Every structure is written in C-alpha cells, then in structure tokens.
Image (spheres, rainbow, N blue to C red):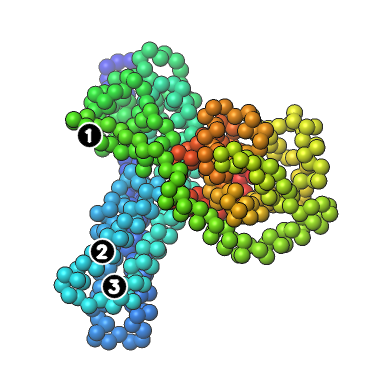
Amino acid sequence: MTLVDGLRSSEAESSGAARARSGVQQWMRAYQRAAVALDATAMLLGAGAAFAVRFPGVPHDDDVPYLGFSLALPMFWLVALALCRAYRPRYTGVGYEEFHRVLRAGFLLVASVAMLSYAFKIEIARGYVAIALPLGVFLTLVARYRLRKRLHRRRWNGACMRRVVAVGHRAALSDLIRLLRQKRYHGMDVVAVCLPPSDRGGPVRKVPVEGDFGQVAQVVDRVGADSVAVLACPEMDGVALRRLAWQIERDDVELAVAPALMDVAGPRISIRPVSGLPLLHVEHPELDGVRKALKTLLDRVGAGLALLVLSPLMLTIAVAVRATDRGPVLFRQVRVGRGGREFTVLKFRTMVVDAEHRKAELMDDNEHDGVLFKIRSDPRVTRVGRLLRRYSMDELPQLFNVLRGEMSLVGPRPPLPEEVARYGGDVYRRLVVRPGLTGLWQVSGRSDLNWEESVRLDLRYVDNWSLAMDLQIMWKTWSAVVRGSGAY
C-alpha cells in the first residue's frame, strides 16, 4: 500500500466513524424533540381539561387570566423538566430514572406555583390547580411510557443503538456482550473491545478486538463510538480512568464504569469524600423496620382487593379445571418460605392427578440445568392447564398465601424443599425474605431462565428491594403475563 492509499484509507475510516457517531446523535435529537412535543401537549391537555371543568360554558372576563395561564403552563412545565434533567441523553429509554425525573419536575412545578401565589398574594382556584397539574404530570408519564416502548421496539430491530467500546478482560466482556444482546432495549451495541496487552486472542463473541487499554481513545475515534464501558479490572485504576475521561471528553463521548460491586442498586451506594479521597459507601439492605411493615400492609391490602376483583375469573377457572378430568381444583405443594419455614402453596391444578408420580419417569427429559425441573412440552399438563400456565392464571390462588403472610406480592421464587437441600452457601440468602407471587424472575423470562440467572435475580432483589421496585415489578408483570413468554 502506498502512502497515498494509506491516507485515503485513513480518511475513509475517519469519515465512516464520523457518520456513525452522527447517526447516533440524529436519532437522539429526534427522540428529545418528540419528548418535548409530547410533554408540552400533555400539560396543555391537562390545563385545558382543568379550565373546561372549573370554568364551564362561555369564558367570562374573570376567566381570561386562567386561559392565559393554561396556554403558558406548558412552557413552565418544559422549564421544570429541563431543570430536573429529564432531557439528558443518559436517561433516554431508562424507565425508572426517566419517570423519577418527571415526578420530581411535577413536585417542583406544584411547589413553585404555591410559593409564587403566596409571595405575590395571587388567588388561584384550587380546583383548577388540583386538576391541571396532576393530570398534566400523569399524561406526561403516559406519553413518555409510550415513547419509550416505541424506542424499545426500534432497538429490538437494531435501530437507535448507542455504539459502545467495551474495555476489560475477556470473560467479563463476553458476559456483558451476551447480556446486551439478550436485552437490546438497553440500546447498547458493543462494536469494539479493548483487552489487556497480554491477551492476544481473537474476537470476543464476534466483536473485533481493536486495541489494548492504552488505545481506547483512538479506538473510539476509529469506530465512531459514542460510549465507553469500562468493566472492573485492576489495570484501569483511578489515574487511568481520569486520563481516559480527559481524552474522550472533547467528542462528548459517555464514559460508564462498572464497579467491582455487582448487583448493588444505586440507592444503596453513596460517595463520601474522606480527606479528599472519594470512598464508595454501601448501605446494608433494609430487611426489617418501617418499610418492611409498609410492604406487609401493601401485600395484605393488595391481595384482598385482587381476590375481590378476580373472584369471578377464579370461579370460572375452578369450574374449567374440575370439568377437565374430575380431579381436585387446587394443587397443594410444600414450599420453603422465609427463614426456611415450610408452608403449603396453593395453585390451580394444571397437570393430571398423578403428575408427581410420573415425574421420575421424565427426569431424563429435563430441559433445565441445575436444580430446577422444567419441560417445555410436559405431557402431564392438561389442555386447560396449558392455557392457565401461559398466562400465569394458575398462580392466582397464591393470593390466599399472601393474605396468610406466607408469601408476598413481590419476592423470590418459592423453592421446593428438595431444591433448598441442594443449595450452595450464597443461595440460602433467598430465604431471608418472603417468596413472591411475582418477582424479577417473572418479568425477566420466567422458565426460559437458567438456574444461575434465576438465583442471581433473586439475590439482586433481596439485596436491593424497595417499595418503588415492588411497584415497578408489579407493573411489568402485566406485560410479561400478556406476552406469555417463558411460561410452560
């Protein structure tokens, strides 16, 4: 290759990298413009509905200020959202953080209106404010949710992805790439990896190795990446990370660092400087106390209301199960709950009456690794039972277990005694909380999860649970049940 050819090749690579980064910036700006338009429209609809309810009929002279305020309210709303960083690219498509910032902006706007009306002695109709602001915030959350779901669908098709250069050791990078390919809605596409200089191996899960730890900035420029993910490794210490941040900040490339503390949620982590040295503090999970009492109250009230609402459906299911083969309607099985205490779990029967006796004959057909026993086309499942399992309706009687305090609405999967007998040391931590009717395992694939993944999700829940997390899991359970994926 001549010098001219080399320069042309370098210019072509640079041009391609610039186009790739420009493509990421274009869809990001389009998403932000759509979010701004939807936010303004949502608050305008809320203000319009409040004006129509509070001042029905033809507007009078006294109503004109409220009409003007209704038209100006969307602008105030956009300012509040911007102050709460609801349009930051790093929160794009991240449901919990995005919704949290919208709610913070809502509280900021309500507080601002209250303080301004008090400071300047402005009389504002309470009925108008009580409708306009909550309705506007609610419509914004709905609009953001629909926009995020649309983004997730595009990401499953390979569009709207962030181009990531991953830095770390081969095994950790392999796990990261596998997880991001399984959950493409995160929007992170690893286009290149950087390994230690001593690693001379080939690609990692078909992702090319473009350099070592000292060439990350050059690799970012060459492949047109807009994000760098650094996994925990001793070579990338504080000094190396600071130098890397300096090198990539001119192109506004995002730097994400995975600490050695895995599966620890943000609320439990805080950075506190000690003598100028930033130390990462990790709080213990709150397994008792006021929040635990609130969770118990939520469980009992939620289970009671659910039984009242779902009683016609449960009666219909009971008749269908009974008519299938004249066997018992309910299936009772011993499970292990909090602290290793055994209890009897209730489910609608989905298998033939002698299913447990036939289990030994089917052990060779087990499709799961580890402790669990699952067969995708289990011959013991009845025709009605297959439908019930697909949409998790067979688990509705467990609401009685929740009422009795044996289970929670959200928690780890309730294990069998023979499963607990085969637990390793760390797995016993699943038993420090009550098992749940749903959980992270339910919204993350259900029976499609292998044993290690199921355990990891349960331990993550135990160490990071919160009431907000419970509500988020219950919300996601509906879509998981409707899709019926991983249920067999």
Looking at the image, do the residues carrying marks 1 and 3 touch, with CB atoms under 8 Å apart?
Answer: no
- Give, as a three-letter code, the residue at label 3: Ser
Number of the label disc, if any, that sits on residue 111: 2
- Give, as a three-letter code, the residue at label 2: Ala
Task: Please rate how many residues cluster around mark 1, counting C-alpha atoms within 10 Å: few if below 14, some from 14 to 19, many from 20.
Answer: few
Of the pair 68 and 402, the residue shown nearer to us: 402
- Whole-percent x, y for residue 438 in the image: 57, 48
Viewport quadrant of the C terminus: top right
Does residue 26 appear in this view? no
| Residue visible at 52% across and 39% down in the picture | 432
Of the pair 114 and 295, the residue shown nearer to us: 295
- Whole-percent x, y for residue 233 in the image: 36, 22
Judged left or right of residue 344, residue 423 is left
Viewport quadrant of the N terminus: top left
Q: Quadrant of residue 4?
A: top left
Which residue carries the number 3 mark?
70
Gap in angstroms between the C-alphas marked 1 and 3: 46 Å
Q: What SS does tag 2 mark? A: helix
Q: Which of the marked residues, 1 or 3, is nearer the chain's N terminus? A: 3
Of the pair 217 and 381, the residue shown nearer to us: 381
Does residue 362 appear in this view? yes
| Residue visible at 17% across and 75% down in the picture | 121
Which residue carries the number 1 mark?
273
Task: Please rate how many residues cluster around mark 2, counting C-alpha atoms within 10 Å: few if below 14, some from 14 to 19, many from 20.
Answer: few
